[in-house]
Amino acid sequence: MTEKTILRALKGEVLPTPPIWMMRQAGRYLPEYRATRAQAGDFLSLCYTPDLAAEVTLQPIRRYGFDAAILFADILLICQALGAKLWFETGEGPRLSTVTSAAEIAALKPADAIHDTLAPVYETVRILSRELPKETTLIGFAGAPWTVATYMVAGRGTPDQGPAHALKAADRAAFAALIDRLTDATIDYLSMQVQAGAEVVKLFDSWAGSLKGQDFTDFAVAPAARIIAELKARHPGLPVIAFPREAGQGYVGFAKATGADCVALDNSVSPEWAAAHVQVDGCVQGNLAPGYMVTGGAEMDEAIRHVVRAFSKGPHIFNLGHGITPDADPANVARMIEVVRGG
Ligand code: 1CP
């Protein structure tokens, strides 16, 4: 059997057509997702019911034939597995019990205690690895420690990650201990996903852009490097995608510094700049602005061709620069795939 296109790109092969998948490809822009989510009752029940989580993962594969499927789950499940309370307020987003002191951090469950809570996620991966078409790559994922910590400290999403920055400034040792706990747990969590059948894993550091200077080195680069080194020791040859979103200049050298096989790019960097400064070190993923999935038309076609052309001399996986939004038109997604594949 010829190797899957995503795995070939991750090994550094330059393909005539970039493989394609899309962040949040299972999501609210799809009517079939909304129907399954309604059947589950609420978002967390959807994440923790393996048959339904596998079903929503498969929906965009059936509809569009993406080259990869990403496990349906959320980066915040691990917080619950570590002992935090987690719920989703309809129309608002996640809410968590907060962790703001050295004592509360020390009281979190140890890494090896997370698997009871997360067992349904591993079951979803097992179902997917049986049911996906043979040419489709299965991607597992976790949030990077810094991004997960921003939610644990604040108890919710924040525009500037203020509470996490404040704890880091007030008690750097306690904050570093939280990052360490999350790093250990993330290694075990991703390792279990790989044992269950994930072929690639992706680390989402959605708020990496708010870490500057030494903080970026200590809390974005170093944890990613430790996670990737340990995963590759346990699973030789495992490809890893890292997404230090809005890292800007921090993208330069990120793959070398962390051992990632691919760096995912947000759409605040130009493809030409990223080809010259990031793709020189290996595979990149990205980076069409998600807004085109709402607006479509000839401008979308041109923007897609621009991204494909700019990255055509090196290894590239086509994706958006961030998740597709609920107001996107499903027809624009079909058109995007057609244009990437030469239409
Ligand atoms: O009501 C719904 O259906 C909820 C919307 C939703 C979805 C579809 C949430 C709530 N999570 C998810 C799934 C999800 N989340 C996936 C599944 C796979 C796929 O991409 O199809 C993944 C990989 C994530 C990752 C995730 N969750 C991130 C990192 C990526 C990113 O978007 O930056 C983050 C920050 C979260 C937290 C989260 N979960 C959900 C929301 C609305 C948020 C953001 C909250 C905030 O900051 O306010």
Image (cartoon, rainbow, N blue to C red):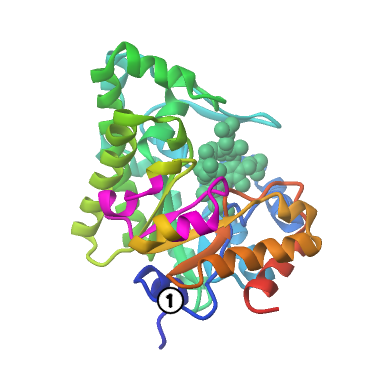
The image shows residue 120, relative to residue 106, as above or below, that is below
Front in this rendered view, residue 94 or 300: 300
Beta carbon of the mark 1 residue lies under 8 A of ligand 1: no
The image shows residue 136, relative to residue 264, as above or below, that is below
- Of the 4 image quadrants, the one containing the C terminus is bottom right
Front in this rendered view, residue 140 or 225: 225
Front in this rendered view, residue 94 or 52: 94
Residue flagged by tag 1: what amino acid is it?
Answer: Val
Residue at 62% from the left image edge and 55% from the top image edge: 26
- Of the 4 image quadrants, the one containing the N terminus is bottom left
Front in this rendered view, residue 207 or 129: 207
What range is drawn magenta here?
251-275
Q: Which residue is mark 1?
A: 14
Residue at 55% from the left image edge and 28% from the top image edge: 157
Is residue 18 one of those drawn in magenta? Answer: no
Image location (x, y in percent) of residue 85? 47, 26
Say whether residue 25 is left or right of residue 115: right
Image location (x, y in percent) of residue 136? 50, 73
Q: Residue furthest bottom?
A: 1
Residue 290 appears in the figure: yes
Query: Count of labels shown?
Result: 1
Say whether residue 304 is left or right of residue 15: right
